[in-house]
């Protein structure tokens, strides 16, 4: 599989994903987030989610939709 790298600043939702994830009660861990995404058919490990939150990995459109759903927010809330 070809490895791709993101251009810094091209990931628009990572910081919001982290902010919302950590604002939930109880706090949602990266492992919990991976489980929530897997339940929605998106399989990302803790490392991949961390890279997204740190703006080191791009986010595909269907992943953004799954993040919003898993966090219980609208897609616009991630931007």
Image (tube, rainbow, N blue to C red):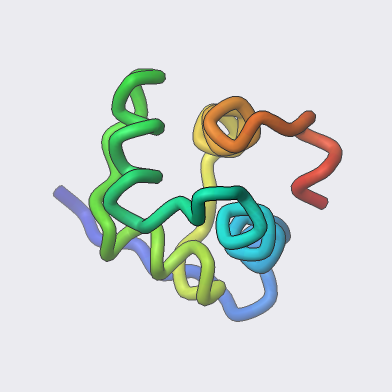
Residue farthest to the front?
A: 26
Q: x%, y% of residue 40? A: 40, 19
Q: Nearer the viewer, residue 54 or 25?
A: 25
Image-quadrant location for residue 71: top right
Location of residue 46 with respect to 33 vertically, above or below:
below
Residue farthest to the top?
A: 40
| Left or right for 47, reference 74 | left
Residue farthest to the left?
A: 1
Residue at image location 38% in from the left, 57% down from the top: 29
Residue at image location 35% in from the left, 62% down from the top: 4
Counting the numbered discs, the total is 0
Location of residue 76 with respect to 15 vertically, above or below:
above
| Left or right for 58, reference 10 | left
Q: Nearer the viewer, residue 59 or 53?
A: 53
Q: x%, y% of residue 22? A: 58, 61
Q: x%, y% of residue 10? A: 67, 67
Residue at image location 25% in from the left, 61% down from the top: 3
Q: Nearer the viewer, residue 35 or 55?
A: 35
Q: x%, y% of residue 19? A: 67, 64
| Left or right for 62, reference 38 | right
Q: Nearer the viewer, residue 21 or 77?
A: 21
Image-quadrant location for residue 69: top right
């Amino acid at each position: 599989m070809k490895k791709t790298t993101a251009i810094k600043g091209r990931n628009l939702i990572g910081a919001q994903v982290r902010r919302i994830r950590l604002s939930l009660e109880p706090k949602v861990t990266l492992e919990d987030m991976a489980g929530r995404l897997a339940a929605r058919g998106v399989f990302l490990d803790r490392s991949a989610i961390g890279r997204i939150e740190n703006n080191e990995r791009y986010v595909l459109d269907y992943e953004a939709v799954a993040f919003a759903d898993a966090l219980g927010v609208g897609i616009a809330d991630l931007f």
